[in-house]
Image (tube, helix red, strand yellow):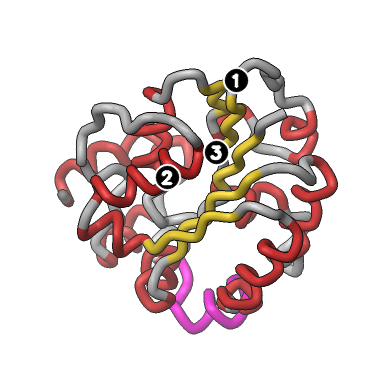
């Protein structure tokens, strides 16, 4: 069975792929991230033997599949391998400083030093080690840089589609889930979660 798993990283254009590219692919059984936001649901994913099965969930390299903050991305990749050992993997990386800055804006109720020292798992910064480990587990791995998406989205999307084995669909090159300004993000972090859900889309439009 043909299975392709897009694992993130988080904050590397995942929402763009999930909204603008993946749903438009032909002959693909696309499993969207919000249908698999826990390990048990990943095990229950419905696969189609007659199509390419595409699973996209950037949480596979982040919090959704961790028992605690000590669980590294490498351990999560081991779990993926135990479930789907023959899967093909799509991984998008980003400049580490940009990536940290973007992640921090989602957690900025703390100071950066406090967040980095006490919350962020520093093992996740070992991109080279993670890529080597993924390639050691899976036989077919595509690694792309977020900078390519930003600089030439057509080339980026073509490489993704070529790897999956499908034609490039018509897509809109629009920024989705854009990071907020740091000052705005800090203010948002103090708002209760139930209000934040409604305010974030509005603030991202204002911030764009």
Q: Which of the marked residues, 3 or 1, is nearer the chain's N terminus?
A: 1
**Mark 2 neighbour density, 10 Å: few (under 14) some (14–19) many (20 or more):** many
| Of residues 142 and 39, the one drawn nearer to the viewer in this rendering | 142
Tell me which corner region of the image, top left, top right, bottom left or bottom right, holds residue 133: bottom right
N-terminal of the pair, mark 1 or mark 2, is 1
Residue 95: which quarter of the image? bottom left
Identify which residue, 19 or 27, lies in the foreground: 27
User: Marks 3 and 1: CB-CB under 8 Å?
Assistant: no
Q: Do the residues labelled 1 and 2 touch (CB within 8 Å)?
A: no
Residue depicted at x 78% and y 55%: 67
Q: Is residue 165 left or right of residue 38?
A: left
Q: Earlier in the sequence, mark 3 or mark 2?
A: 3
The residue under label 2 is: 160
Query: Residue 128's spot in the image, x, y percent?
Result: 58, 77
118 part of magenta stretch: yes
Q: With respect to residue 169, does 39 lie above or below?
A: below
Tell me the element at label 1: loop
Q: Name the residue under label 1.
A: 51
**Mark 3 vs mark 2, CA separation in Å:** 12 Å
User: Which residue lies at the image location 70% right of the left edge and 18% below the top edge?
Assistant: 49
Rounded to the nearest whole Å, what is the CA distance between mark 1 and mark 2?
Answer: 17 Å
Q: How far apart are marks 3 and 1 (CA)?
A: 15 Å
Say which element carries label 2.
helix
Left or right, residue 93 beside residue 128: left
The stretch in magenta equals 108-121
Q: Mark 3 points at which residue?
A: 56
Q: In this view, does 157 lie above or below 68?
A: above
């Amino acid at each position: 069975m043909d299975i392709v798993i897009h694992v993130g990283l988080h904050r590397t254009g995942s929402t763009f792929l999930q909204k603008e590219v993946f749903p438009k692919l032909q002959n693909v059984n696309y499993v969207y991230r919000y249908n698999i936001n826990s390990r048990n649901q990943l095990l229950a994913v419905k696969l189609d033997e007659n199509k390419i099965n595409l699973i996209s969930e950037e949480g596979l390299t982040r919090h959704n599949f961790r028992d605690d903050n000590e669980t590294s991305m490498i351990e999560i990749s081991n779990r993926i391998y135990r479930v789907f050992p023959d899967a093909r993997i799509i991984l998008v990386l980003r400049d580490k400083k940009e990536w940290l800055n973007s992640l921090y804006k989602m957690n900025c109720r703390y100071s950066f030093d406090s967040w980095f020292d006490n919350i962020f798992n520093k093992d996740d910064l070992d991109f080279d080690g993670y890529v080597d480990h993924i390639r050691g587990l899976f036989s077919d791995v595509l690694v792309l840089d977020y900078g390519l998406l930003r600089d030439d989205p057509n080339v980026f999307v073509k490489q993704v589609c070529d790897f999956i084995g499908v034609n490039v669909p018509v897509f809109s090159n629009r920024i989705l889930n854009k990071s907020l300004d740091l000052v705005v993000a800090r203010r948002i972090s103090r708002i209760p979660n139930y209000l934040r859900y409604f305010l974030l889309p509005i603030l991202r439009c204002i911030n764009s």
